[in-house]
Image (cartoon, grey):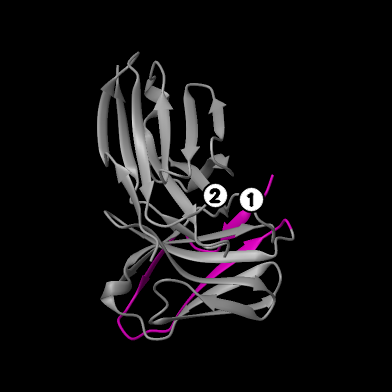
Amino acid sequence: ELKVEQNPLFLSMQEGKNYTIYCNYSTTSDRLYWYRQDPGKSLESLFVLLSNGAVKQEGRLMASLDTKARLSTLHITAAVHDLSATYFCAVEKGGSEKLVFGKGMKLTVNP
Amino acid sequence: DVKVTQSSRYLVKRTGEKVFLECVQDMDHENMFWYRQDPGLGLRLIYFSYDVKMKEKGDIPEGYSVSREKKERFSLILESASTNQTSMYLCASNVGIYMTPLHFGNGTRLTVT
């Protein structure tokens, strides 16, 4: 059974600081997705990572995928308040187009 | 832009009622999904459909059924609502090939009393 774990689940950080969050999964998969959810809103897609070594960057966020380690990282550079949200990673289940989501990481960036 | 529209933002229903949650997408997507989101549990897949009249169970299908009579519309049905089905329900869709992200609706917050 595919399990997806995010670490940490809560993060409070100061503006301007850097941090890396982690997403581990338990069975082989080549496809991993990152989503963002603002309070009271739905999820929006951030990154689609499709192969080992994939790296995607958008603004202050950079995501990478290591399929051998079954690990994805989301690195935050020089955080700003607008990044405050909940971040989910999701892993595709055996090429089935079903996604298994992590529990989400709530990020608060303080001025 | 893809639009996934859920018919109700908030619903309050009584235990035992039959409840219909409706979802419509406007981009001719093959796949449609129903998730529920609960604090501390993330999103869990209830059902998904990869074509009209086709459906597959997700991870937590018990107590739910679905209907997809037209490509753009995917309904989630609670046959007899129970309090443990109080949750946020999210509909999503994507193109029917690998590698495309899900597009989510704004969610329906259902309270069963």
Q: Is residue B113 at all visible to an observer of this figure?
A: no
Task: Judge by depth and name the residue closer to the eye, B98 or B14.
Answer: B98
Q: Is residue A36 above or below residue B91?
A: above
What percent of the width, then of the height, locates residue B98? 65, 55
Q: Is residue A7 left or right of residue B49?
A: left
Q: Residue furthest right?
A: B28
At x 38%, y 82%, the residue is B63
Q: Does the stretch in magenta take in B20? A: yes
Is B111 rendered above or below residue B14?
A: above
- The chain carrying label 1 is B
**Regarding mark 2 in the picture, which secondary structure is present there?**
loop
Residue at x 27% of width, y 42% of height: A9
Name the kind of residue labelled 1 in the image. Met
Q: Is residue A6 visible?
A: yes
Q: Position of residue B112 (x, y in %)?
A: 31, 73
Callout 1 crowding tier (Cα within 10 Å): few <14, some 14–19, many ≥20: some
Asked if marks 2 and 1 touch (Cβ < 8 Å), the reply is: yes
The residue indicated by pointer 1 is B99
In the image shown, does B27 or A24 lie closer to the viewer? A24
Identify the residue at horizontal 27%, vertical 75% (top origin).
B83
The magenta stretch spans which residues?
B1-27
Quadrant location of residue A21? top left
Q: Quadrant of the N terminus of chain B?
A: top right
Say what amino acid the circle numbered 2 marks.
Arg
Q: Which residue is mark 2?
A: A31
Left or right: residue A101 compared with residue B34? left
Rounded to the nearest angstrom, the CA distance separating label 2 from label 1 is 7 Å
Residue at 38% over, 20% down? A79
Q: SS class of the residue under badge 1?
A: loop
Q: Is residue A62 left or right of residue A7?
A: right
